[in-house]
Image (cartoon, rainbow, N blue to C red):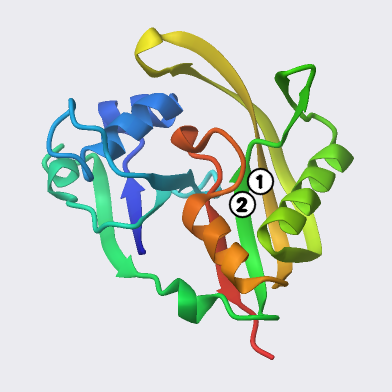
Amino acid sequence: MFLSRLELDPGHPRARRDLGDPYEMHRTLARAFAPDPDTPPPRFLWRLEPTPVTQPSAVLLIQAETAANWGPIESLGGYAREIRGNKPLDLSHLVRPDGRYRFRLRANPTVTRDGKRHGLDREEEQLTWLSRQGEKWGFALRGCVRSASERIQSRQGTTGRRITLRAVLFEGALEATDADRMRAAVQNGLGHGKAWGLGLLSLARIAT
């Protein structure tokens, strides 16, 4: 796995467009993983980090199984103020049995009723959704806060259909209960809406 960090200039026209539309952001980032617009990129996850209003840059984290070629992004002339690319991420070393971690996750909590997917708006429902994800993917929450909840609008693929997603930012601590399943959660992301900057589970080990 590889982890990259980009600082974008919100004053750059294309960066401003991408920051306002997750679909366009995904299309731009895909240029680092595919040789041309007609080639589907391999799976990658990304997240727009929360930043103070006084900070002049917008920070993105991008995680992928393959190293990115950030040349096409650098060629956009001021789009990114800084690119820290392709830091190796060894999941077998990071995620250990019974390990404890600080985490951050921006995700789309949903429930399926009558064959349709519905977003969860209430905080207690969103936290319950995350607990269920932990049961499924081998971790247990050891403290969590929902620090942001908002609706994001974008469009879906080549159809251009407008969609609205609930994006929730979770932060806190968790413990690995099944290291193999938890590695899969980090590698594949959690929940739906991954192309729109959701699902990336970031971990930092807590020293014991």
The residue that appears at 56% across and 45% down in the rendered structure is 199
Q: Is residue 56 visible?
A: no
Secondary structure found at label 1: strand
Q: Quadrant of residue 79?
A: top left
Report x, y in % for residue 135.
77, 57
Q: Is residue 148 visible?
A: yes
Q: Are marks 1 and 2 in contact (CB under 8 Å)?
A: yes
Q: Local crowd at mark 2 within 10 Å, few (<14), some, or many (≥20)?
A: many
The mark nearer the N terminus, 1 or 2, is 2
Q: Label 2 sits on what residue type?
A: Leu
The residue that appears at 69% across and 64% down in the rendered structure is 138
Q: Label 1 sits on what residue type?
A: Leu
Q: Quadrant of residue 65?
A: bottom left
Report x, y in % for residue 162.
51, 10
| For residue 55, side relative to residue 119 (left or right) | left
Give the residue at mark 1.
169
The residue that appears at 81% across and 64% down in the rendered structure is 143
Give the residue at mark 2.
105
Secondary structure found at label 2: strand
Report x, y in % for residue 183.
54, 65
**Placement of the C terminus among the 4 image quadrants:** bottom right
Q: Local crowd at mark 1 within 10 Å, few (<14), some, or many (≥20)?
A: some
